[in-house]
Amino acid sequence: MEKREPEIITEKDQMRTWSRSMRAQGKTIGFVPTMGYLHRGHISLIQEARKWTDLLVVSIYVNPGQFSPTEDLSTYPADFQGDIDKLTALPGGVDIVFHPQNLYDYRNNGSESGENDTSTGASCRNNNCSDAKEEGREKAVVSCVEERQSGHETWVRVERLERGLCGKSRPVFFRGVATVVTKLFNIVEPDVAVFGKKDYQQWRIIRRMVRELDFPINVIGSEIVRDDDGLAMSSRNVHLSTEEREKALSINRSLSRAKVAAQNGQVSCRELRNSVIEAIQEGGGKVDYAEIVDQENLEVVEQIKSPVVFCVAAWFGKVRLIDNMEIDLRVQPVTIAVLA
Amino acid sequence: MEKREPEIITEKDQMRTWSRSMRAQGKTIGFVPTMGYLHRGHISLIQEARKWTDLLVVSIYVNPGQFSPTEDLSTYPADFQGDIDKLTALPGGVDIVFHPQNLYDYRNNGSESGENDTSTGASCRNNNCSDAKEEGREKAVVSCVEERQSGHETWVRVERLERGLCGKSRPVFFRGVATVVTKLFNIVEPDVAVFGKKDYQQWRIIRRMVRELDFPINVIGSEIVRDDDGLAMSSRNVHLSTEEREKALSINRSLSRAKVAAQNGQVSCRELRNSVIEAIQEGGGKVDYAEIVDQENLEVVEQIKSPVVFCVAAWFGKVRLIDNMEIDLRVQPVTIAVLA
């Protein structure tokens, strides 16, 4: 099959013009938003999207709105030409790579100028706009967007789903994700968008947001892709030393054991959580959270009765990894427990 | 000219299908969102929209998301047939009236069911999700949407602009407006939307939101329409007694005097505010706020140097009225001040 390089678009207007002209020709558009440094996990999202639509747009944009100033925005890995090569090598290719420079720069866009807004960063920092303060946490809840004083102040919040799990230690994260996805949806105007279930909370938040803001977009969740050793694919894995990577396998291994234990009748979340936390700690990781939550509303459960997902975040050296495992006891009957 | 009844659409999908089929035919779509009980103010918005696009959609929907449970949602005036008659009588008419029953009902829409969400109302009430609590206010910051436990939890916030003026006494209002307008934009998919400058803060918030969420929509502001006696048109005016209405004229009269005073050299906002507050109180009104703010970022100013808007909210009996006056000293030179 002939290789096909994607067209690279950097301007919002040009991106929208392309989408509208394609739609006018009756074509459907699939969309996979990424922050680049593509790996097999991203490729699986793109392959999933290909099943649904005529055309494919992949965005590559590291979103400052979802990083706090103390997080790893500056060291987030990037390899744009490598990404383009990978997309070109894909069977069927990708039609467009949308690669904007700065989605929060409005200087050439409407009368609301950025110049009046130099106080934004400081003002937002002082006021602690998010709900983090209400829960007694001390973290400053500004993102790198406010830190840069771009003047941007509109944020999409999915108020309940954004609170738990990663939201506790990353108070600006989901606000930033929901907002940039809204922006990208309004620029790309896709029919279908694919998100990875590795970022489970993010996937649920986007689905909920799409429903509740009435976006005319079908949001598809794509299964986690793992390396041969079981580690969930992540752009951040590149920062792991060989030793840290070996230690990080404790996440997937302990989650898999917990799933088997649940299928064998251990439905106490306290027991299951303790076993995973101990295994990761013994493996040399520092657990941020390990929670068993309802698959849909992400509320913590005590006993596994309905479909749940076991979500984990843990640090290995300077790298924070997340992983999860869906557990649905309706799907696999607990035959061994009955025999025991 | 022949009278033309608008087509009434109540379903989201049907609305979007209409818009997309019109766009496919190369037509442009104008949109005027309203809460019904139409008066000459609304008509002027519709006439403004007509200048810009081929087709016109007017929505009539009283949005529970912008009312707190203690506000006047249940008594908000309605006259759907009267509204249709007025729109039919308009020269050129209106193409579509979008009149949904409940924009927050997702039961037949995607897998995220409402049934899991019965805890929403209580949970949100207890957590005081908005920033009102941070500012020491005691008001419960839930809207009628949370009160009804619909499960809806996605909100668009324009964090700085929503805080002052009406935001202080109505903490859920602009969150609700920005969210329902986002929903309506995603359903109607217009090219142009017209908002009244009578709701000045709302107009600025929507413009800002459209810019920062990258909606492909041109937002037009339309001037305030006043009755012959000077009272700004509002659906709520119907609740004023003859006596209250007479008293309410103190708002517009004092604002007009303040504008003349500014043009004559009185640029101290303290003096100008005091004169308006006194006049409204003497007229029998209870002032909620009277603030002179920058036209763009709505920040309170001490002295009039740049274009400002003098915004007032006041109660007359059980009716809360708002009004405002733009003051731009660059437009009308202060000749009298020079002579004085």
Image (tube, coloured by chain):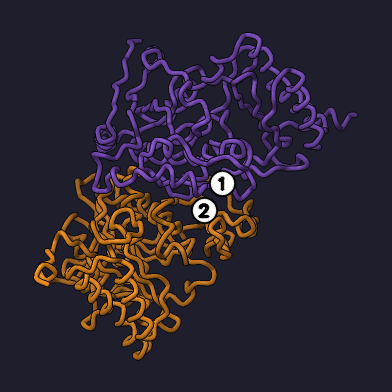
Chain colours: A purple, B orange
Numbered tag placed on residue B106 in the rendering? 2
The disc labelled 1 sits on which kind of residue?
Glu
Quickly name the residue at label 1: B112
* Left or right relative to A316: residue A257: right
Which residue is more in the foreground, A132 or A154? A132
Which residue is more in the foreground, A334 or A184? A184
Numbered tag placed on residue A154 in the rendering? none
Q: Residue at x 74, y 28 (%)?
A: A259
Give x and y (percent) for residue B105.
Answer: 51, 57
Quarter of the image for the N terminus of chain B: give it.
bottom left
Q: In this view of the protein, can residue A256 be seen by the observer?
A: yes
Q: Earlier in the sequence, mark 2 or mark 1?
A: 2
Marks 2 and 1 sit apart, C-alpha to C-alpha, by 8 Å
The chain containing the residue under callout 1 comes to B
The crowd level at tag 2 (other Cα within 10 Å; few <14, some 14-19, many 20+) is some
Q: In this rendering, is residue B15 above or below B234?
A: above
Q: Residue at x 25, y 42 (%)?
A: A109
The chain containing the residue under callout 2 comes to B
Q: Are marks 2 and 1 in contact (CB under 8 Å)?
A: yes
* Left or right relative to B261: residue A303: right
Quarter of the image for the C terminus of chain B: give it.
bottom left
Give x and y (percent) for residue A95.
Answer: 32, 23
Element class at badge 1: loop
